[in-house]
């Protein structure tokens, strides 16, 4: 792996584990409970994270199809989600895309990371490496939401336990 990707790779692996740790012990009923009418539930946030990970895969040249795509296509808000995937489907899709991304990080070259990214993100670094950094920060933001929702639903706090580690 390129040294320029090492820190990003570590965040990818950490967020992969924390996502799964946030969902530990949570069932579908709890995952789809909205704390208020104006908040998302855990399953919706998790679906958004899965979708964002598949976007990162596309951004990095992986030709992966999100298995949740049919149910998430065109959905921008929780109120538009007609058929919420079950947590086992969400977890499977998360593990699948995360494993593919971890493998992709191993073979990216410095040249792959330098060109202007395909997408403009709200950061100054417009390179592919900058896009990776933004998308991984996006993961972190929403994993934090999952941790908050988990605690608000009465579950123990999210753990940094390595039982779901991919490395």
Image (cartoon, rainbow, N blue to C red):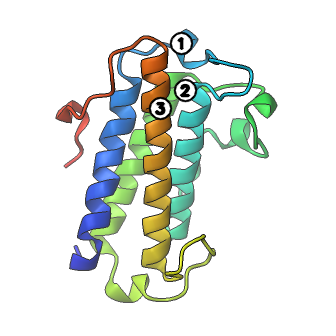
Badge 3 element: helix
Is 75 above or below relative to 137?
above
Badge 1 element: helix
Mark 3, mark 1: which one is toward the viewer? Answer: 3
- Indicate the quadrant containing the N terminus: top left, top right, bottom left or bottom right: bottom left
- Image coordinates of residue 91 in percent, x first then y, are 44, 32
- Label placed on residue 146: 3
Q: Residues within 10 Å of mark 2 (few under 14, many from 20)?
A: many
3D distance between C-alphas at marks 3 and 1: 12 Å
- Image coordinates of residue 74 in percent, x first then y, are 79, 46
Badge 2 element: helix
Asked if the residue at tag 2 contacts the one at tag 3, i.e. Cβ–Cβ closer than 8 Å, the answer is: yes
- Image coordinates of residue 159 in percent, x first then y, are 26, 29
List the residue tagged with mark 2.
42
Q: Left of 140 or right of it: where is 14?
A: left
List the residue tagged with mark 1.
30
- Label placed on residue 17: none
3D distance between C-alphas at marks 3 and 2: 6 Å
Q: Residues within 10 Å of mark 3 (few under 14, many from 20)?
A: many
Disc with the residue nearer the chain's start (3 vs 2) = 2
Q: Left of 38 or right of it: where is 1?
A: left
- Residue 110: name its quadrant: bottom left
- Image coordinates of residue 137 in percent, x first then y, are 45, 57
Disc with the residue nearer the chain's start (3 vs 1) = 1
Q: Residue at x 54, y 74 (%)?
A: 123
Q: Residue at x 44, y 34 (%)?
A: 92
Q: Give the tally of numbered discs.
A: 3
Asked if the residue at tag 1 contacts the one at tag 2, i.e. Cβ–Cβ closer than 8 Å, the answer is: yes
Of the pair 46 and 143, the residue shown nearer to us: 143
Is 104 above or below relative to 130?
above
User: From this viewpoint, is residue 143 visible?
Assistant: yes
User: From this viewpoint, is residue 63 visible?
Assistant: no
């Amino acid at each position: 792996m390129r040294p320029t990707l090492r820190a990003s790779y570590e965040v990818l692996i950490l967020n992969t584990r924390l996502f799964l740790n946030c969902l530990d012990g949570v069932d579908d009923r709890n995952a789809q409970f909205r704390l208020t009418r104006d908040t998302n539930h855990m399953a919706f946030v998790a679906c958004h994270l899965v979708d964002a990970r598949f976007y990162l895969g596309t951004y990095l040249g992986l030709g992966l199809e999100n298995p949740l795509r049919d149910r998430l296509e065109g959905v921008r808000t929780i109120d538009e989600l007609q058929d919420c995937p079950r947590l086992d489907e969400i977890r499977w899709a998360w593990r699948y895309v995360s494993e593919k991304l971890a493998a992709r990080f191993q073979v990216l070259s410095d040249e792959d990371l330098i060109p202007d990214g395909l997408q403009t993100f709200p950061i100054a670094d417009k390179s592919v490496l900058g896009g990776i950094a933004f998308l991984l920060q996006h993961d972190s933001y929403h994993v934090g939401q999952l941790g908050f929702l988990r605690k608000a639903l009465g579950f123990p706090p999210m753990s940094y336990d390595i039982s779901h580690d991919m490395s």
